[in-house]
Amino acid sequence: MKKNNIYRAVTACTFASAVLFSMPSCTDGFHEANRPGTGASAEDLNRDNYMTSSFIVQMENEAFPEQENTYQMNQDLIGNYLSRYMTYANNGFAEKNFARLNAPNGWVRYPFKDSMPKTVSAFKEIARVTNGQGLNYAWALILRAQSFMRLTDMYGPIPIGADPNDGNAYSSQEEVYKSLIADLNKATGIISPLVAANPDLTVSAEHDKVYQGKFAKWLKYANSLKLRIAIRIRFVAPALAKQLGEQAVQDGVITSNEDNCTIAYTPNGQYKTSVEWGDSRACADLECYLAGYNDPRLAKFFKPTEDVGPRTIIGCRAAAKIGNKATADKAYSAANINQNSEGVWLTASEMAFCRAEGALAGWSNMGGTAQSLYEEGVRLSFEQWGAGDATSYLADNTSTEADYVDPISEYGGNVSAVSNITIKWDNAATDDQKLERLATQKWIAMFPNGQEGWCEIRRTGYPKVFPLAQPTDYSIQVANRIPFDIDEATNNKDNYLKAVQLLNGADDYATKMWWQRR
C-alpha cells in the first residue's frame, strides 16, 4: 500500500472508532456480560445464529485479520516486522517504523482505536442477544480471547472493563491474562458437553470462515489457545501455567494439520502487502536461519528475487535504510503466497512445540518427551508446507545459521551469524541450549504468524537476531512492546497515568511484558 493510502485508512478507521468511543465505553459491562452460560436448545441456536452471524463475522475478521488494511496495520507493520519474518521494502516507511522503535502515532494507535472497539462492540451485541448463554456466546468468548491476547501482547495493560465504574480504566497484563483464561474455561465448559453429545455439531457453517461451523474444531482451538497462554506465562506464573497447560492437553489440543486454524479471505492479507503492493519483503534473519540449515521451507515461504543476486532467495535486514522501493522490491524476496491462500493463525506444529516445552519444564502427560515432541513439531511443519520428509533434517548436528550478505550494501549491509545452534536434539545439552534449539525451530514453524514469532523472541530471548541496520534511541534489538496511543495521555489522562504505573516502567518500546523471561 502506498504511504498516503495507509494514512487515509487510519483516518477513516479513526473516525469510525471516534463514533464508537462517543458512545458509552466499548468495554463497559465486560464482566457483567461475561456471566456463566448454559447449553442452548435448537430453537435458541437458530434464533441466535440469525441475529449474531454478522457480529461473529466481525469478530473473526478482527481475531484473524486478513483484510488488506487491517492486516497491514495490525499484523504486518507490527508483528511481522518485529518477529524478523518480514521487513519493509517501502522507502516511505524507512525513517519511522516499529523495527526502528519510532513508529508514527497513527500506526501505534491503530490496533487500540480500530481493532479493539470493533471486537468489543460485536461481542457486546452477541452477549446481549444470547443473554450471555449458549453456543454463540461461547464462540464469541473464544474470538475475544484471541483478539485481546494479541492486543495485550502489543501494549501490555489494556482496558477490559474490569472496573464497573470506569470502562476506560486499564487492567494489568496479569489481570488481562487471568480474565482470558476464565473466558476460555467458560467457553469450553459450554461447548464440551454439546460436542460430547454430538461430535458432528455444526452451526452457522456459511458464516464461519475458519472452521465452517464445526464446533469440535473450535473446542480444540480453544484448548490450544489455553496451551499457548500456558507456555507464554510459564516463566512468570509457573504453577498456573502448569495447571492450565496440563488441563489443555488432557482436554484436547490441535495435533493434526487438518485442524489448523486458518481463515479464508480473498485477497489474502500478506499477498496484498508483500506481493501486490511490494511493501514487505523477507527479513534477513529468517532467510539466514533457513539457508544455513539447508531448510526446504525457505522456498515454500519466499519467492526468488527478480534481480540476479548472490542467492536465489534474499532477505533484507531489519531497519535497513531503504533508498528506493522499486530497487528493494527486485533485490529482496516477496512472500510465496497467492491471493486465495488461507491465512495461518495456529497450527499443530506450534502445539507440538508447546507440548515439547511443557515436557522440558516437567509438566505431566504432554504426549511424549521433549525430544519426541520437538521432532514432531518439525515434521508437522514440513507436512504443513509440503516440504518433504524431515528425517535427514532432524539428524543434522552441524548446520548453523548462515552469515548475511546484502546485495545492496548501502541499504542494510553484511553481518555475521549470531547463533551457532544446530538442529538435532541433544539430551546432553544445557537447559538453555535445549530452549534455544526448541524456540528457534518453533519460531521458524510459526511463520507467517509474526505476532506469535515476536512473542517468542521476547519470551525466551530466542532465536538470536541480527543487530538493527540503523541506530535507534534504545539498546534493544527488538521492541518489547509498542507505546500507548499518545492521545490517551490527554483524553484519558488519569487512566493513562495508572496504566503507566501498571507497566512498571516507561511508556516506551523497552519496557518488558509481564511474562517476559529476560
Image (cartoon, helix red, strand yellow):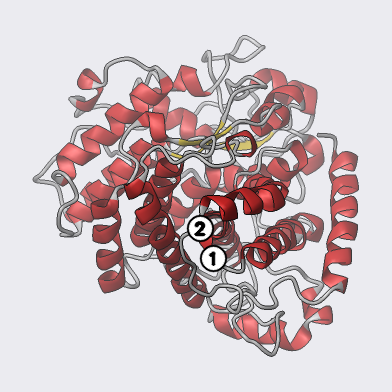
Report the residue at 64% width, 78% height from top. 161
Q: Which amino acid does label 2 sit on?
A: Ala
State the image coordinates of residue 513 (x, y, percent, origin top left). Answer: 49, 68
Q: Quick check: 317 left or right of 24?
A: left
Quadrant of the image containing the C terminus: bottom left
Residue furthest left in the image: 428
| Along the viewing direction, whichever of 364 and 296 lies nearer the viewer | 364
State the image coordinates of residue 57 (x, y, percent, origin top left). Answer: 67, 45
State the image coordinates of residue 303 (x, y, percent, origin top left). Answer: 57, 17
| Along the viewing direction, whichever of 477 and 341 lies nearer the viewer | 341
Marks 2 and 1: in contact by CB < 8 Å? Answer: yes
Q: Is residue 59 visible?
A: no
Pointer 1 or 2: first along the chain: 2
Q: Residue 133 carries which label?
A: 1
Q: Is residue 23 above or below residue 123?
A: below
The residue labelled by disc 2 is 40
| Along the viewing direction, whichever of 436 and 497 lies nearer the viewer | 497
- Local SS, label 1: loop
Dividing the picture into quarters, in which one does residue 384 lie?
top left
Q: Quick check: 23 left or right of 210?
A: right
Q: What residue type is labelled 1?
A: Gln
Local packing at callout 2 (Cα closer than 10 Å; few below 14, some 14-19, many 20+) is some
Q: In this view, does 406 lie above or below 124?
A: above
| Camera-side mark, 1 or 2 | 2
Quadrant of the image containing the N terminus: top right
Q: Can residue 154 be seen in this view?
A: yes
Residue furthest top in the image: 308
- Local SS, label 2: loop
Dividing the picture into quarters, in which one does residue 105 lie?
bottom right
Report the residue at 21% width, 40% height from top. 373
The residues bearing labels 1 and 2 have C-alpha atoms spaced at a distance of 7 Å
State the image coordinates of residue 143 (x, y, percent, origin top left). Answer: 56, 54
